[in-house]
Each structure stands twice: as structure tokens, then as C-alpha cells.
Amino acid sequence: MCGSMVVMQKTSARLLSLLSLLQARRDWPGAVLAERLDVSARTLRRDVDRLRELGYPVRAVKGPDGGYRLDAGTRLPPLLFDDEQAVALAVALRTAAATGVGIEDGAARALTTLRQLMPARLRHRIDALEVTSVARSAPRPQPQADTGVLMALSAAVQAREVLRFDHAPARAAATAAGEAPPPRRVEPHHLVARGGRWYLVAWDLDREDWRVFRADRITPRTPTGPRFTPRDLPGGDVAAFLTGRFRGSDGSGDWPCRGTALLGLPASAVSPHAADGTVEELGPDRCRLTMGAWSWPSLAAAFCLYDADIEVVGPPALEEAFAGLADRCAGAVAKRPRRR
């Protein structure tokens, strides 16, 4: 009896190791798997059959080397996570509220299920991690993207199929005829999450230009259109492209307006508030600051936020923006009623 128990324990441990290997890589040559598990090819085949009996769809791959692949099945068999994966999954579920998708309840239930299956050592680690997920503050609650819409957009991106959808404007408005605008026709390229919101980056077929659409304003239409050959995204990097569009540039990721000025403040006082600007120390109470903005007047105003003496280095457009800002400020004071 003791000998049988030892054999069963070794077999179970070997099955878990085999399952872990199959989940870590798409295709495994049979000889490589057998070598990793230190078993014969015959034992490997028996172990694969045992996994199949447990509900894991392990498929034999034909070819010169032969091998095995763990396919997606019609039902969800028991999953196997290592410690690092389990903790990462728990952290992701706890921060689901900041994703911009209404999945908080589902994430909480999934975390409860995952915690119940965890060994004690991992439960203690998860319980010790207290995370409060707070979405970015906004004047009013941000609308959340519908999970069904996100799935439809992602499917169109993966299938490379033309997508038709209705897109609600930022402010309710009707056309001149009082009718709703026609649906948009786009080639969807990327579904992106940024700052608690989801965006679709796509080539607009009617406007013949790249556009960024908020997913929470999209209502997909069916069926999708024909397949397309993906175009090259400007700059090749979707993160830089999206950042550039929000900054008002051509998609390069940089600000369209960038200038330099000298400030009568130490670099240590400016650096914490410079964001993506560059600060160079020139003395105990003087530094050079280079930063960008979406327009020259907004850049001039950003320099004024430091409440210090300013000397414009360049370019000339920044000097003109400071002059215009000074005129506006003087005009605002001149229009103020005099106090008696």
C-alpha cells in the first residue's frame, strides 16, 4: 500500500509538471517533453492520456519531430498557476475598477474564487496586499466602456475586417436635416486602454485619415465589412501615436510647441513640477527649463505657473506668446471696476 501511494504521488506531480509545461508554450516536441520530465516516450503518452481524461484538450501534433499542444477546449478544466502568476492575477483583479470597464462585480467574484483555491502561503500574501483602486478624478463620472463593445472591436481588429459603427458626439447635436449622422466606416487597427478609458485607433475610410474614437461612444453595426490589409501607423508605435494625438501633434508623440526659458528658481524647486520637461541647473537660484504644450499661449502660461522671474530663450513664437499673454493680463486688470 505504501509503495502504491508513492507511485501515485510521483504520477500526480509529473502530471502537474507536464501541464505546466504545456501551458507555458504552444508546441512541444515529444522528445523534448520526455527529456524535461525524465520519462520515456511511452510514459509520456500515458500521462497525456490521463490529462485528456481530466478534460485537458491535449492534441498530438504531426511532423518530423512529433509533439503535443494544449488547445482551448469546450469547457474550462482546472487551471494551473505558479505562485508568481497567481499573485499577479489577484493584483489585476483588485485593480479592475480603474480599467474603465464595468467588471468590478465579476472581478470581485473571480478573486474570491481564486483565493479559495490558493494555498495558505499565497492567501496570506494576497490578504496582506490592501489596494484601493481610484479612477482618475473628473468633473463628472466617466462613462465606462461596455464589455460587449470591447469584444466586438477587438474581434474586428484581430480579423482585420472593416467596421461600421455609430459614434455619439461629445455633445448632443443634430445635423442640419435633424437626422442622425451616418455610421462611420473604418479599418480598425488598435484597441487601447489609456487613463481609465478605452480608445479605437482606426483609419477612417470616408475621411481618409487616422482617427481615435472613444469606445464608450461606439455602437457597432453588423455585419462587419470586407477584410483589409493593415496600413502602417504613423511612427509605428501606437502609444506614441495616441499620446501625440492627445497633445495635438501629428502623432509623433511630442508636443507640437516646445520652448525654453530661464527661471529665477533653483532646479530642485522646479524639477518636481516639470512633468516631461527638462531642467538644467545654472546656479543656486537659477535654472533652464525646456517643456512643451499643445499651443504657444498655453506654453507661455505654463512657464508663468512657477511664479518666478522669466527670461525667454526661444523660439521667437514663445516670445510672441508671452507678449500676447501680457496684453491679455493687462486688459483683464484694466477692465476690473475700480474700488472706492
Image (spheres, rainbow, N blue to C red):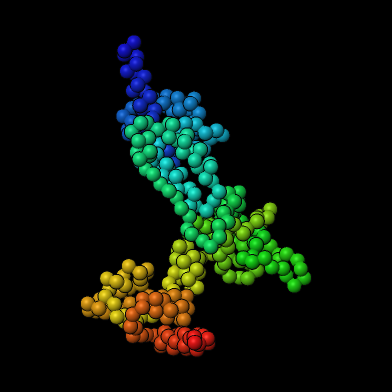
Q: Judge by depth and name the residue closer to the eye, 238 or 299.
A: 299
Q: In this view, does 307 lie above or below 148?
A: below
Q: Quadrant of the N terminus?
A: top left
In the displayed orientation, state which residue is furthest to the top: 1
Q: At 48% from the left edge and 26% from the top edge, which residue is drawn?
A: 54
Residue 192 spot, x, y in % from top left: 51, 58
In the displayed orientation, state which residue is furthest to the front: 340
Snapshot quadrant of residue 301 = bottom left
Residue 68 spot, x, y in % from top left: 44, 35
Q: At 35% from the left edge and 71% from the top edge, which residue is drawn?
A: 274
Q: At 51% from the left edge and 38% from the top edge, which residue is drawn?
A: 109
Counting every numbered tag in the picture gives: 0
Q: Judge by depth and name the residue closer to the eye, 285 or 151.
A: 285
Q: At 26% from the left edge and 79% from the top edge, which residue is drawn?
A: 286
Residue 1 lies left or right of residue 159; in this view the side is: left
Residue 321 lies left or right of residue 227; in this view the side is: left
Snapshot quadrant of residue 14 = top left
In the displayed orientation, state which residue is furthest to the right: 177
Q: In this view, does 220 lie above or below 88?
A: below
- Asked whether residue 328 appears in the rendered view, the answer is no
In the displayed orientation, state which residue is furthest to the left: 284
- Asked whether residue 71 appears in the rendered view, the answer is yes
Residue 162 spot, x, y in % from top left: 63, 59
Residue 53 spot, x, y in % from top left: 49, 25
Q: Judge by depth and name the residue closer to the eye, 29 or 126.
A: 126
